[in-house]
Image (tube, rainbow, N blue to C red):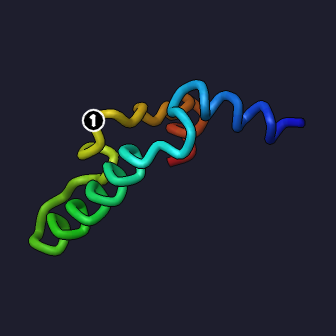
């Protein structure tokens, strides 16, 4: 039942099998690998303007 709710939420937010999102993720991952290989420091998430920001809880920040 939980999985059905998760899929329903995904489809509501992103649409069904959103190809554009997948392409954006793949390109951002390749670009971040290329930038890192040339001495840069960037995360793939920074190159994905349509992706939600990762929310880090206070407890997770303390553990790091």
Which quarter of the figure has residue 46? top left
Disc 1 element: loop
Residue furthest right in the image: 1
Measured as percent of width and height from the top left, residue 62 is found at: 54, 38
User: Image height check: is 28 above or below 56?
Assistant: below
Q: Is residue 41 left or right of residue 44?
A: left
Relative to 22, is 30 on the left or the right? left
Judge the density around disc 1: few (<14), some (14-19), many (≥20) Cα neighbours within 10 Å: few
In which quadrant of the rendered image does the N terminus lie?
Answer: top right
Q: Is residue 30 above or below residue 17?
A: below
Taking the view exactly as shown, the residue that stands out farthest to the bottom is 37
* Of residues 2 and 46, the one drawn nearer to the viewer in this rendering: 2
User: Where in the figure is residue 26, as x and y percent of width and height?
Assistant: 34, 59
Q: Relative to residue 28, is residue 59 drawn left or right?
A: right
Q: Position of residue 17 (x, y in %)?
A: 54, 46
Residue 49 found in image quarter: top left
Residue visible at 39% across and 44% down in the picture: 21
Measuring 15% from the left and 64% from the top, which residue is drawn there? 35
Which residue lies under the disc numbered 1?
49
Residue 57 percent across, percent down from the top left: 56, 31
Farthest-out residue, top: 12
Residue 32, by quadrant, is bottom left
Q: Residue drawn 34% across and 53% down? A: 23
């Amino acid at each position: 039942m939980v999985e059905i709710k998760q899929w329903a939420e995904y489809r509501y937010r992103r649409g069904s099998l959103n190809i554009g999102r997948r392409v954006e993720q793949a390109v951002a991952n390749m670009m971040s690998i290329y930038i890192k290989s040339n001495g840069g420091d960037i995360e793939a998430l920074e190159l994905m303007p349509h992706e939600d920001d990762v929310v880090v809880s206070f407890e997770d920040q303390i553990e790091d």
